[in-house]
Amino acid sequence: MKFRVKSQLDHIEKGGILDDCGPSSVAALVAWASAYQVDPSAADGIAMKKKITGQKDIDGKSDNGSSLAQLIQVARGFGAKARWAKSWEDVVESAKKGAGIGVHVQQPIGYPEGQEVSAWNEKWKKWWAKTDKAHLRAGYGHMTAAGFDVEEGTWYWACPTRSGKGAEAFGVKISEANLRKIADSKRVSGKTKTPDYRHTIIVEWPGRNVAPVPPTPVQVPTPVAPVKARVSLDEVIDAKLDAPVKVAAPKKAKDDSKFKEEIDALGRVHWGSKADEAGKILARGLEETRGKKMVEKIKWVFANTGIDEALLEACRVGLSSGLAVMLATGAPLLDMTTQDFRTVGSAALAAAIQVVVRALNPDDAKFGVGKAKAARAAEKLAALGTRAK
């Protein structure tokens, strides 16, 4: 299976502006990852990016750049699974299972000698060499796509400046070592200090997992010093939409309620007795704090009920659960999407609801009222005294 190019050359703006390499490359990645079950065009990718981000583009102006985080969302918009790469080994292993690899580059800095890119690139490289050598030395931010063909045992790399027609209908064959050098171009150019894999994204198709690859000789890549810097959010040159293309939104999986167990437990609570219990404690509190300030009334409630304990426990478990899920997303904190934060919030809420259920459970003495709370305090003091002896 050859890697088909999704060319951005069909979307040139006034003045020769090309700013749609990001969504064009994502279209190629989604098509490859799905084994062309889904085959969006460059225009489809541009339309999906516009739909998701709401980002406007002015014809003739390079103003529609994308971050890698946005391109992950574009891929998800087509129904694919997309994420940041965790290591170069993760890149290779995922590609050999059928995933598409998005590679953010500073083209053509640090590229292997003689590496084919595109006719467009060769034309402008010669032009810049004569008219703007500084631009040629600096390179330009760009997004490209790659994939591994298991049957051939071959890597393909596709720059969206290829025409997508004739000799440039497909990506070029490339070695893993050369692909890694290209992925390292951002660091080599001095634009960032982050290693190669931090400039890649992995696009997978749900349910697709190709046959394992036979063992091949290990290729030794150019060593990269480990760094602690967060992934760069340099904007890649992106997208201009000539004509909107309607792309069907992916169907959302049905959620049978994340809180079913907690809701069922709430349904077993005897609300009549709870209301009676609350009324009695309220009347008792008003009687014992008559003529006192509101602060004293609140202190009485805390001293004679388990409300303060329940609130603190709910906050504690909610924050700890939310933090655990936040770290599990794998995305840099500042690049978390709305969906990521909704997932974190759902986890925190579910944990807090469990505390509410405990507080309402008549068989759970932790959050008791009046004498029950005092009795627990006495038991703790007695236990401390016993240990002291």
Image: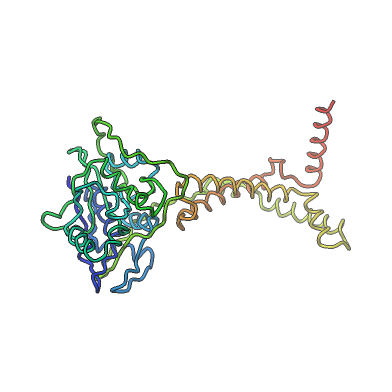
How many marks do you count on the picture?
A: 0
Q: Nearer the viewer, residue 369 or 279?
A: 369
Q: Image quadrant of residue 161?
A: bottom left
The answer to whether residue 245 is above or below residue 206 is below
Q: Nearer the viewer, residue 278 or 63?
A: 63
The x and y percentages for residue 350 are 56, 49
The x and y percentages for residue 196 are 36, 46
The answer to whether residue 204 is above or below residue 295 is above
The x and y percentages for residue 261 are 54, 45
Q: Nearer the viewer, residue 192 or 378?
A: 192
What's the image's color scheme? rainbow
Residue at the extreme top? 389
Residue at the extreme right? 291
Q: Image quadrant of residue 108?
A: bottom left
The answer to whether residue 189 is above or below residue 177 is below
Q: Image quadrant of residue 49?
A: bottom left
Q: Quadrant of the N terminus?
A: top left
Q: Quadrant of the C terminus?
A: top right
Q: Is 308 placed left or right of 292 in the picture?
A: left
The x and y percentages for residue 95 are 29, 42
